[in-house]
Image (cartoon, rainbow, N blue to C red):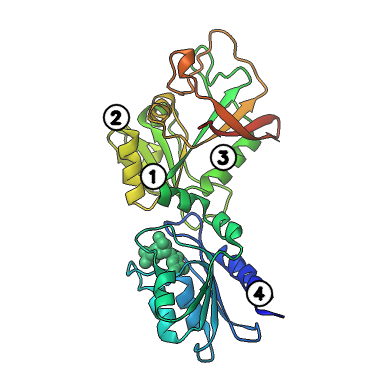
């Protein structure tokens, strides 16, 4: 096997290892393998989540032979900073690694520069091997690094005629049990689930992930000025909850970013969702549409923050699927 083939095989292995890391997590998922000159994998590691050693350190520790002369194949550019852990570029240099093959360069300005540091130390660096796959590992993290805030995914449930409640205000349940199972899967991909105090008071929701394995429950974020009553389900110990006493979406996201949250699931209600739309801070839409009509007197109450046709948010639909009897539409704002 020539070098190119062996690096590709090794990168495929590193990508497989990376997905063992927790998602969601404040940190990206990263995998690393160490290969000898015959293309044999002699060490491997992956990042187990924020606060634990990086993938390269795990791989170096897994070796049962000296590291000198080996090639490190890593899905993300080795870091060059001392954060919760020391710089991986330095560790690779000190271990005597001869060559480093990188999937994706690190877009995080704090950690970037590892490749240059390696080159300065005389180590050969090859960039961009299976880059698309490396990028796909960490879409939400990349979004958050680029935008300086978490990605906001807004979910709503409505009837086919776009109503979220009947004329008398009754609103549970519009969609099917199957659609609710899907909601738990989607929540599990997020580090935070967010509602306004209006929804918290009206529905007394739990906002936990149920029926899906998660390393930890997402943070429950309640935005607004009103108090949660004693005995509210959101006050339970089953998941952490934070009350943010403000309505400025940008400030809310700054706080969540500070907490290392990369993807937020926004479950309404209309006041909070409307505020996020007006601020231009909705990045994805997940609509669950039930095969039912609630007719003329029923309020739409979905919360797109629009009062005249000219303000309508135009979306691009990425996917339409059935979930049991319901339709699921995935869309995003049309930013052309
Ligand atoms: C690597 N290898 O396995 C990971 C890297 O707070 P820290 O110290 O854990 O640093 C987190 C940053 O380091 C993260 O934002 C990203 O830029 C980089 N992650 N780098 O060399 C790894 N997980
Ligand atoms: Zn590192």
* Earlier-in-chain disc, 4 versus 3: 4
Q: Which mark is residue 236?
A: 1
The residue sitting at the top extreme is: 296
* Earlier-in-chain disc, 1 versus 3: 3
Horizontal and vertical percent position of residue 76: 50, 65
Circle 2 or circle 1, nearest the eye: 2
Q: Which mark is residue 226?
A: 2
Q: Which mark is residue 227?
A: none
Q: Secondary structure at mark 2?
A: loop
Horizontal and vertical percent position of residue 64: 54, 90
- Spatial CA span between label 3 and label 2: 26 Å
As displayed, is residue 24 above or below residue 187? below
Circle 3 or circle 2, nearest the eye: 3
* Earlier-in-chain disc, 2 versus 1: 2
**Residue 52 seen in the current view:** no
- Spatial CA span between label 2 and label 1: 18 Å
Q: Are marks 2 and 4 in contact (CB under 8 Å)?
A: no
CA neighbours of label 1 inside 10 A, class few (<14), some (14 to 19), many (20+): few
Foreground of the two, 307 or 78:
78
Foreground of the two, 142 or 205:
142
* Earlier-in-chain disc, 2 versus 4: 4
Q: Are marks 1 and 3 in contact (CB under 8 Å)?
A: no
**Residue 23 seen in the current view:** yes
Residue linked to disc 4:
4
**Left or right relative to 300: residue 241:** left
Residue linked to disc 3:
183
Q: Going 49% across and 50% down the picture, which residue do you hit?
A: 140
* Earlier-in-chain disc, 3 versus 2: 3
Q: Going 52% across and 31% down the picture, which residue do you hit?
A: 336
- Spatial CA span between label 2 and label 4: 60 Å
* Earlier-in-chain disc, 1 versus 4: 4
Q: Secondary structure at mark 3?
A: helix
């Amino acid at each position: 096997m020539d070098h190119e083939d062996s690096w590709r095989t090794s990168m495929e292995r590193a990508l497989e290892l990376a997905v063992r890391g927790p998602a969601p997590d404040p940190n990206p998922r990263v995998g690393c393998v160490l290969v000898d000159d015959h293309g044999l994998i002699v060490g491997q590691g992956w990042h187990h989540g924020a606060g634990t050693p990086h993938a390269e350190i795990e791989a170096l520790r897994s070796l049962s032979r000296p590291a000198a002369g080996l090639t490190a194949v890593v899905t993300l550019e080795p870091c060059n900073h001392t954060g919760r852990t020391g710089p991986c570029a330095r560790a690779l240099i000190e271990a005597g690694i001869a060559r480093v093959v990188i999937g994706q360069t690190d877009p995080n300005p704090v950690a970037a520069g590892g490749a240059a540091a390696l080159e300065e130390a005389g180590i050969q660096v090859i960039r961009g091997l299976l880059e698309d796959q490396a990028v796909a590992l960490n879409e939400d993290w990349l979004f958050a690094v680029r935008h300086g805030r978490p990605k906001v995914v807004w979910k709503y449930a409505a009837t086919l005629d776009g109503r979220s409640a009947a004329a008398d205000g009754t609103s549970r349940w519009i969609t099917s049990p199957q659609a609710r199972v899907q909601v738990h899967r989607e929540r599990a991909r997020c580090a935070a689930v967010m509602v306004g105090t209006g929804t918290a008071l009206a529905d007394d929701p739990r906002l936990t992930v149920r029926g899906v394995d998660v390393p930890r429950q997402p943070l429950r974020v309640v935005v607004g000025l009103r108090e949660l009553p004693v005995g509210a389900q959101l006050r339970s110990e089953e998941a952490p909850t934070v009350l943010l006493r403000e309505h400025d979406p940008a400030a809310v996201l700054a706080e969540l970013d500070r907490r290392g949250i990369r993807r937020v699931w926004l479950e309404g209600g209309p006041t909070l969702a409307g505020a996020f739309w007006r601020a231009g801070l909705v990045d994805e839409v997940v609509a669950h549409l039930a095969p039912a009509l609630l007719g003329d007197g029923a309020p739409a109450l979905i919360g797109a923050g629009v009062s005249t046709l000219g303000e309508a948010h135009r979306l691009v639909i990425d996917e339409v699927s059935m979930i049991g009897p319901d339709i699921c539409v995935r869309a995003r704002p049309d930013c052309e």
